[in-house]
Image (spheres, helix red, strand yellow):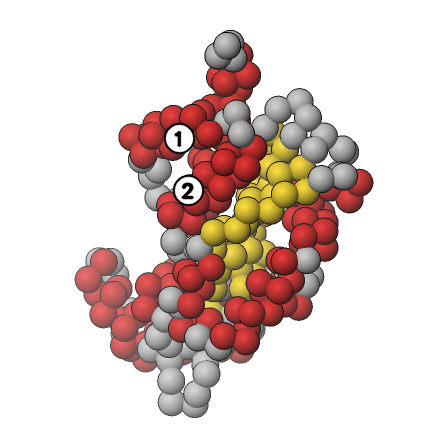
Amino acid sequence: METLSLRQQTILNRVVELYIETAQPVGSRAITVLFRDLYADSYSPATVRYEMGQLESVGYLTHPHISAGRVPTDKGYRFYLDHGLKGETVSQEVFGEVGREISNAAREEQILGETISTILAALTSQMSVVAISDSAPSLLTSALIRLYLKGTHRLLEYPEFHDVRKVRGLLSHIDETTAFARWLDERCMESPGISVTIGNENKLSVFQDCTVISASCRMSNRRRAMLALIGPRRMRYARTIPLINRLRETIEQALERVLRSPVDA
């Protein structure tokens, strides 16, 4: 990967953040104004245009039309995730209530799966999928796989998914429970922590217009859950990544408390 100057890194990260916020191509003027408001050492419009052109020439930015501003490529988003992302603070109060909801649902697996998926979709404003498997070493050999899907309408709220055929293709693949669960399992085996794949980084073509964030958590000695968020490339990473990570921790902590507590007679 090319070495970017500090100025190029700063401009690239700001382009990504503005595009995530607005869904509109970002012009040099918007970056110039932003820098003038935020930084003591602002850059001239000519300097910003030049650097954005350099970033485009090496594949971090592109533009949908000749006269339009730039948008991040998958490579640009990846650089932002690896080098520019600053996660938002997660509310302790919110996750205290989340822990209680999970504890209350813990005794019935279907209710638990539905609860987790509902919470994940509500917290992140993305489509969520939760897959729960029995204790086989891999979902590939699990006899039972249960999927819980919430927030499908969230996709339609993004301009990237106004094409209903695209959303239908996603949902059709998820409906093929075994294939989708196998894919989730492979992701979690390769990246035991939080896994984020953007656009063409996704091996399955049906997800190559999306970002997928996934994580695995232990539910008991015989069960584990895969959590996944599916949304546009311009997902609010600074919010969603800390949230799914904290939810994973909260699930494990809440279920451990339930396992240690006596079952009501």
112 horizontally vs 147: left or right:
left
Quote the CA–CA distance across marks 1 and 2: 9 Å
Q: Residue furthest left?
A: 37
- Residue 233: percent from left, percent from top: 49, 64
- Residue 217: percent from left, percent from top: 58, 33
Q: Judge by depth and name the residue closer to the eye, 108 or 203.
A: 108
Residue drawn at x 47%, y 59% is: 152
**Does residue 255 show up?**
yes
**Does residue 85 show up?**
no
The amino acid pointed to by label 1 is: Glu
Q: Which mark is residue 53?
A: none
The residue beneath circle 1 is 101
Residue drawn at x 43%, y 90% is: 66
- Residue 250: percent from left, percent from top: 46, 29
Residue drawn at x 38%, y 53% is: 125
Q: Residue furthest front?
A: 265
Q: Earlier in the sequence, mark 1 or mark 2?
A: 1
Would you call the spot at circle 2 few (<14 residues within 10 Å), some (14-19), or many (20 or more)? some
Count of numbered marks: 2
- Residue 186: percent from left, percent from top: 71, 47
Q: Residue furthest bottom?
A: 66
The amino acid pointed to by label 2 is: Ile
Check the image and report above or below for 193 versus 96: below
The residue beneath circle 2 is 119
Residue drawn at x 33%, y 39% is: 89
Which quadrant of the figure contains the N terminus? bottom right
Check the image and report above or below for 257 versus 106: above
205 horizontally vs 48: left or right:
right
Q: Judge by depth and name the residue closer to the eye, 18 or 252.
A: 252
The answer to whether the residue labelled 1 contacts the one labelled 2, judged by CB atoms less than 8 Å apart, is yes
